[in-house]
Image: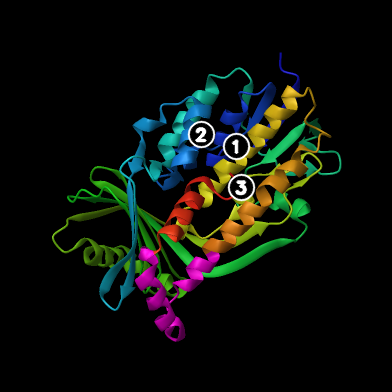
């Protein structure tokens, strides 16, 4: 018999994954969704996830995600010097996969189907725009509803976070736009690649035999000056990278602004921020959703321990424990990605130092090992 009740507000990747993972616990979950789910169905973006996070989701979700999670055994990093792309760092492993790439819409569809079969998750198609932070209740019309735990999974810009964070966040406007697209090519690409181009970092993430997705981060000014010919410019850049003989078909071209936003406060009373709302970071390293999954894992473990001890969620200091467990890693990795992005910016005064580092970095086996461990399992595991 279910004894406690929580709500999750938001039906993006974070909200759906959290609801599915926590459904194994002895709790009732109300999942508040957007009334219009067309954005979920039409989300053609892809996401990268590490091997350890993939294994966690596969075990916890009980879904056959291997059918649409594309395994990657090799990652190549390139730096552009004039018109030459120098391969300065490689990661590979014949025995295990380094990461997986998946289409967001397929994963979301699978999660929705799983949630619909669970008797302890209620899908509620109502928008929650008001919260009583002092009482720990959500407000729907004239009705105030109390939950043992309220989890906000509303992306990075929700106004519902303001009274929790209290203006104490680490923020940075990169003045950059992330361009995403799906690309079909006659050339089979099995390995993931990161190109640090003059215009900004471009990631190639294969998710099928002749398909890959890309994320290209460029300055606002470059985007605005080329917005009408963006597809043509991207096509030309891919031709340089993949060589002229490759046939390229660009689909699902989208763009969004890039910001750094790291919360220093995670909760208030029984209300917790989760997902991109905790850490919105630069997409160049593909660490965003990996941090989210580790947050979900930590929260699930704490709820499980509480249940084992027969303790209630509310008033158990579970959110304080979650904050102390996850804040150091979330902050360090987010700022580490920010520093890496700054290192690869095109600056003449730092070019000699950059070239020296890139020339020798692939020789450092210790550094490569540490990088792999952190990318796969994070810092606190």
For the residues marked 3 and 1, what is the alpha-carbon distance in whole angstroms? 12 Å
* Foreground pick, 10 / 188: 188
- 369 relative to 293 in the view: left or right: left
Q: Which residues are magenta?
A: 338-363
Which residue is disc 3 drawn over? 380
Q: Name which quarter of the figure residue 335 lies in.
A: bottom right
Please report contact status of discs 2 and 1: CB closer than 8 Å, yes or no. yes
- Crowd rating for badge 2 (residues with CA inside 10 Å; few <14, some 14–19, many 20+): some
Residue visible at 61% across and 25% down? 23
Please report contact status of discs 2 and 3: CB closer than 8 Å, yes or no. no
> Does 349 lie within the magenta span?
yes
Q: Position of residue 286 (x, y in %)?
A: 46, 53
Q: Quadrant of the N terminus?
A: top right
Q: Relative to 332, is 200 above or below?
A: below
Q: Name which quarter of the figure residue 194 lies in.
A: bottom left
For the residues marked 2 and 3, what is the alpha-carbon distance in whole angstroms? 15 Å
* Foreground pick, 282 / 41: 282
Q: Earlier in the sequence, mark 3 or mark 1?
A: 1
Task: Report if residue 294 is visible in the image.
Answer: yes
Which residue is disc 1 drawn over? 297
- 114 relative to 31 in the view: left or right: left
Q: Position of residue 202 (x, y in %)?
A: 37, 62
């Amino acid at each position: 018999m279910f004894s406690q009740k929580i709500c999750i507000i938001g039906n993006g990747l974070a909200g759906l994954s959290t609801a599915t993972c926590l459904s194994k616990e002895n709790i009732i979950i109300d999942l508040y969704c957007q009334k219009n789910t067309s954005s979920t169905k039409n989300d053609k973006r892809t996401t990268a996830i590490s091997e350890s996070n993939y294994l966690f989701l596969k075990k916890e979700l009980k879904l056959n995600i291997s059918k649409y999670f594309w395994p990657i055994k090799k990652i190549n990093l390139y730096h552009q010097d004039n018109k030459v792309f120098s391969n300065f760092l490689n990661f590979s492993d014949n025995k295990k996969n380094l990461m997986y790439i998946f289409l967001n819409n397929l994963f979301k569809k699978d999660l929705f189907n799983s949630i619909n079969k669970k008797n302890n998750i209620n899908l509620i198609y109502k928008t929650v725009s008001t919260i009583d932070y002092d009482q720990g209740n959500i407000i729907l019309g004239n009705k105030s509803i109390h939950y043992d735990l309220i989890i906000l999974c509303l992306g990075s810009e929700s106004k519902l976070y303001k009274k929790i964070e209290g203006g104490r966040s680490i923020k940075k406007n990169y003045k950059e736009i992330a361009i995403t697209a799906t690309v079909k090519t006659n050339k089979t690409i099995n390995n993931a690649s990161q190109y640090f181009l003059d215009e900004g970092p471009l990631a190639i993430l294969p998710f099928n035999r002749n398909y890959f997705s890309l994320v290209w981060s460029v300055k606002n000014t470059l985007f605005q000056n080329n917005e009408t010919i963006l597809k043509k410019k991207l096509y030309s850049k891919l031709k340089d990278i993949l060589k002229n003989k490759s046939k390229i078909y660009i689909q699902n071209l989208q763009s969004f602004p890039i910001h750094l936003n790291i919360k220093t406060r995670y909760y208030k009373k029984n209300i917790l921020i989760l997902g991109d709302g905790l850490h919105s970071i630069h997409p160049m390293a593909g660490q965003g959703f990996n941090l989210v999954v580790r947050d979900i894992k930590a929260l699930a473990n704490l709820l499980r321990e509480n249940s084992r001890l027969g303790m209630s969620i509310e008033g158990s200091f579970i959110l304080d424990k979650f904050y102390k467990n996850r804040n150091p890693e979330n902050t360090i990795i987010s700022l580490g990605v920010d520093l890496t992005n700054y290192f690869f910016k095109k600056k003449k005064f730092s070019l000699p130092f950059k070239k020296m580092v890139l020339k020798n970095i692939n020789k450092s086996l210790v550094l490569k090992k540490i990088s792999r461990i952190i990318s796969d399992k994070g810092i606190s595991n």
